[in-house]
Amino acid sequence: MPQGYCVRCKAKREMKNAKEITMKGKGGTTRAAMTGVCEKCGTKMYRILGKK
């Protein structure tokens, strides 16, 4: 399972229901990211991925 930083727990946690998305970037570009839900508290989490 992918990991991300949970702002509410203030710790790195694994994401439930993780899926890869594309977000708008600066200058009209796109950025790859992962989105999911924190296992412990249920807060929505994001992790920006590197360039492919």
Image (spheres, grey):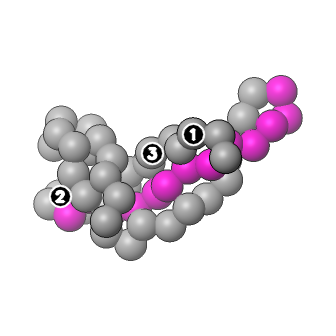
Quadrant for residue 12, please give it. Answer: top left
Nearest to viewer (mark 1 / mark 2) = 1
Say whether disc 2 or disc 3 marks the residue closer to the N-terminus. 2
Find disc 2 in the rendering and name its residue: 41
**Residue lying at 20% horizontally and 64% vertically, measured from the top left:** 39
Residue occupying the far right of the picture: 28
Q: Is residue 43 above or below residue 51?
A: below
Q: Position of residue 41 (x, y in %)?
A: 17, 58
Residue farthest to the top, as pictured: 27
Residue pointed to by mark 1? 50
* 1 left or right, relative to 31: left
The answer to whether residue 35 is magenta is yes
Q: Which residue is mark 3?
A: 47
| Numbered mark located on residue 21 in the image | none
Query: For the residue labelled by badge 3, is the local secondary structure a helix, a strand or a loop?
Result: strand
Amino acid at pointer 3: Arg
Callout 3 environment at 10 Å: few (<14), some (14 to 19), or many (20+)? some
Q: Is residue 24 left or right of residue 49?
A: right
Q: Which residues are magenta?
A: 27-39
* Residue 43 is covered by the magenta coloring: no
Q: Are marks 2 and 3 in contact (CB under 8 Å)?
A: no
- Classify residue 20 by image quadrant: bottom right
Q: Residue at x 31, y 65 (%)?
A: 1
- State the image coordinates of residue 2 (x, y, percent, origin top left): 35, 58
Residue 19 placement (x, y as % from top left): 50, 67
At 46% from the left and 57% from the top, the residue drawn is 35
